[in-house]
């Protein structure tokens, strides 16, 4: 792979090199194209497809199971011509983070009434 291609794939511009010296500055974001760089990082970090058929999940992994189910649902929707889950989200401006303790017997839903139409 050529030096120029490596730079481009990692989100850098060959224009920021002169005589093999990096010339980019903070003012030009060090010559980075953040979108290209993010794509490269995601692609390079994925690694090989992992065979999960022998995986032993426990109750604490329920969120992982649910996420994988949602990803498969989203893929099926997209493959049938629909929009993937989350593509057309409503305005989330009314959602807020919580930073308070609640009693064990209370439900967090009582504090997030405005989020009800976001629940799936």
Image (cartoon, rainbow, N blue to C red):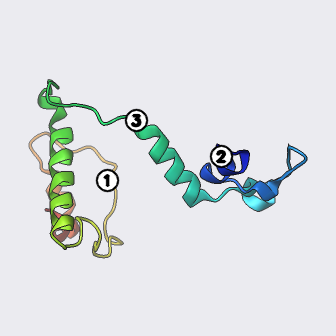
Q: Alpha carbon of mark 2 to alpha carbon of mark 1: how far? A: 43 Å
Would you name the residue on which mark 3 appears?
47
Quadrant (top left/top right/bottom left/bottom right) for the C terminus: bottom left
Q: Which mark is residue 6?
A: 2
Instruction: Please state if 40 lies on the left or on the right of 14 as rendered.
Output: left
Q: In front of the other: label 3 or label 2?
A: 2
Q: Position of residue 56 (x, y in %)?
A: 14, 24
Outermost residue to the left? 105
Secondary structure under the numbered disc 3 in the rendered image = loop
What residue is drawn where x is 46% and y is 38%? 45
Q: Alpha carbon of mark 1 to alpha carbon of mark 3: how far? A: 35 Å
Residue nearest the observer in this picture, 99 or 18: 18
Residue nearest the observer in this picture, 74 or 93: 74
Instruction: Please state if 81 lies on the left or on the right of 45 as rendered.
Output: left
Q: Which mark is residue 98?
A: 1
Q: In front of the other: label 1 or label 3?
A: 3
Secondary structure under the numbered disc 1 in the rendered image = loop
Q: In front of the other: label 2 or label 1?
A: 2
Q: Position of residue 49 (x, y in %)?
A: 30, 36
Badge 2 or badge 1: first in the primary sequence: 2
Give above or below for 20 relative to 112: above
Badge 3 or badge 2: first in the primary sequence: 2
Badge 1 or badge 3: first in the primary sequence: 3
What residue is drawn where x is 68% and y is 56%? 32
Q: Position of residue 110 (x, y in %)?
A: 15, 59
Secondary structure under the numbered disc 2 in the rendered image = helix
């Amino acid at each position: 792979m050529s030096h120029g291609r490596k730079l481009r794939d990692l989100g850098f511009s060959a224009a920021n090199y002169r005589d093999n010296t990096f010339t980019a500055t903070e003012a030009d974001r060090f010559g980075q194209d953040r979108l290209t760089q993010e794509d490269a990082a995601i692609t390079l970090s994925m690694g090989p497809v992992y065979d999960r058929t022998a995986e032993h999940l426990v109750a604490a992994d329920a969120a992982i199971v649910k996420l994988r189910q949602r990803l498969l649902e989203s893929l099926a929707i997209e493959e049938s011509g629909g929009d993937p889950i989350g593509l057309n989200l409503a305005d989330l401006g009314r959602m807020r983070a919580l930073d308070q303790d609640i009693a064990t017997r209370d439900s967090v839903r009582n504090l997030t009434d405005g989020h009800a139409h976001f629940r799936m």
